[in-house]
Amino acid sequence: MTEIRERTVLFADLRGSTALFETLGNAEATSVVTHTVSLIGQAVDTCNGRLIKTLGDGLMAVFNTPRDGVKSAIRMHELLERVVARGKQHGASPGLRALRMQVALARGEVVEMGGDCFGDAVNVAARLLDHAGDNETLITAEVLAGLTSTLKSRFRSLDRIAVRGRAEPVHVHLLDQPNQGDMAATQFGEVVPGVEPDGIRLVWMDLDRVFDIDSMPIVLGRSVQATYCITDGRVSRSHARIDWHGGSFSVTDLSYNGTYVRFGSADEIVALKRGGCTLHGSGVIGLGSPPVDAASPTVRFEVLHFADTEPLALGQSRSRR
């Protein structure tokens, strides 16, 4: 029987499962991944949802209300966090300890047929996963509209993002995790307190642009729909995202090949695999490979204070967006 109903669609995807197969072997890794997906799937049932299918290292579910869908996503992250924490306590393999998850939700009319679901909301939710970093939950404006004020307050807008296969951009919101900003700052070096920056300058070859905080987020990628388009085959369609939050800029890796950040003239390079870090001062962002090879696709950045009279030179003339 075919039915058309308004539904909230959720996709969840484990990241880091490939490393499990390398360290544990096929049989044990398959058991761990299957068990983990089954565990996070319990959050669907407890939040009044319906599991449509498992997808290897992920799942798809539908909910009658946005509230149930978002609560399920939050519960999934909590369950995975417990698995990883127990693994760390019992000396589990690095692959298990590195497991992460991305969740995306969209809402709209869904065609339910033969136990499966089809429609624009399904496509949008599935493709939003490409824009989610480690342990992030992204939702559309339609999902946000159906939440209580308390739940709404836990999300911040990423504005409109171009989604593959869709002509119109999608207004996306990100679930803020507790102390997320503090974690990024302490993990990748302390950020010197001071006056909040006003903008950020990005330079790749002859593409020299300055973005203010109202222009956020900036998606760096090969797609012509990306905010900052880098036409290099080694760069993913949506490779990385620069956000403004908590008084600072941050970059989040969205790719499979990784994003690499080097600050100033430091030798140390921060490797981001679906994770993020705070941007401060100036430096370079390597897309797909570390910024050590002059031929690799790298974007130079400078965090700006527009009141400054002598910003750091990056070798190109400044142009405003």
Image (cartoon, rainbow, N blue to C red):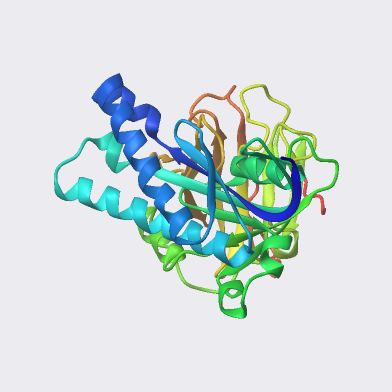
Q: How many labels does the image show?
A: 0
Task: For residue 235, say whether it is visible.
Answer: yes
Residue reaching furthest to the left: 90
Q: Is residue 25 above or below residue 224?
A: above
Q: Percent position (x, y) of residue 107?
A: 70, 55
Name the outermost residue toward the right: 167
Q: Is residue 8 above or below residue 214?
A: above
**Pick the front one: 220 or 131:** 131
Say above or below: 82 vs 58: below
Which residue extends farthest bottom? 149
Horizontal and vertical percent position of residue 236? 63, 30
> In front here: 69 or 22?
69
Closer-to-camera residue (166/48):
48
The quadrant holding residue 250 is: bottom right
Judge from the rendering whether residue 265 lies leftward or rightward of residue 114; answer left or right: left
Q: Horizontal and vertical percent for residue 94?
A: 25, 36
Nearer to the camera, 119 or 310: 119
Residue at 52% x, 65% y is 176
Residue 102, image x, y percentages: 50, 47
Name the image quarter holding the N terminus: top right
Q: In which quarter of the image is residue 175?
A: bottom right
Residue visible at 47% across and 42% down in the picture: 262
Would residue 166 appear left or right of 283 to someone viewing this image? Answer: right
In the image, what residue occupies the spot 50% across and 64% down?
A: 71
Looking at the image, can residue 109 be seen?
A: no
For this view, does 201 lie left or right of residue 261? Answer: right
